Structure formats: C-alpha cells, structure tokens
C-alpha cells in the first residue's frame, strides 16, 4: 500500500485562495464591515430598502433592479473604499 497525500497541494503558480486580502472574498468583506460599523449599518439599510423603493418607483422590475443594485453595493463598497484611499 502506498502513502497518499491528503488535502490540497500548493504550487507556486497557483493563487493563494486563503489570502484574506482578496478584494471580493467574504472574509475581506467581513473584516471591512467589522471595522466600519456605521457603514455596515448604512449598507444593511440600503440592502433592505432598495427593493421596496424599486417596487414603489417601477413595480416588479424595480424590485429586481433594487436587489441587484443593493447586492452590488454590498460587495463593491469595500473595494471602492480601499480604492478611494482608506
């Protein structure tokens, strides 16, 4: 019987997936929003209000757009914040 390596093998050409500095990773977003509590509360408000605002303005299509826009804002805000210089 031969010994087999269990788990993943890292090779120099592969990107390190466990890097918390990856801009779109869930870990990077969590770290960002933990450090910016007031911005996190504002984003929670945006995520919940945008679909209802879309419903009021444009009906069902507005709800879909509100969900997409609020989701994009939630994901992109940490990246834009770092790009802006914080």
Image (cartoon, rainbow, N blue to C red):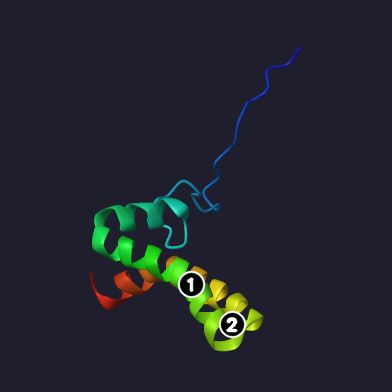
Quarter that holds the C terminus? bottom left
Residue 35 numbered mark, or none: none
Please provide percent x and percent y for residue 55: 57, 80
Q: Is residue 22 visible?
A: yes
Q: Is residue 36 visible?
A: no
Crowdedness near tag 1: few (<14), some (14–19) or many (≥20) residues, C-alpha within 10 Å:
many
Say which of 55 and 28 sits in front: 55
| Residue drawn at the location 32% of the way across and 57% of the way down | 33
Does label 2 or label 1 sit earlier along the sequence?
A: 2
| Residue drawn at the location 76% of the way across and 12% of the way down | 1
Residue, disc 2: 62
Please provide percent x and percent y for residue 41: 31, 61
Say which of 51 and 32 sits in front: 51
Residue, disc 1: 70
Gap in Å between the C-alphas at discs 2 and 1? 12 Å
| Labelled pair 2, 1 in contact (Cβ < 8 Å) | no
Q: Is residue 23 above or below residue 16?
A: below
Crowdedness near tag 2: few (<14), some (14–19) or many (≥20) residues, C-alpha within 10 Å:
some
């Amino acid at each position: 019987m031969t010994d087999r390596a269990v788990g993943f093998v890292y090779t120099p050409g592969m990107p390190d997936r466990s890097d918390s500095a990856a801009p779109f990773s869930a870990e990077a977003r969590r770290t960002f929003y933990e450090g910016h509590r007031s911005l996190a509360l504002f984003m929670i408000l945006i995520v919940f209000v945008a679909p209802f605002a879309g419903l009021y303005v444009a009906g069902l299509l507005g709800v879909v757009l509100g969900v997409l826009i609020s989701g994009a804002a939630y994901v992109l805000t940490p990246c834009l914040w770092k790009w802006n210089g914080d």
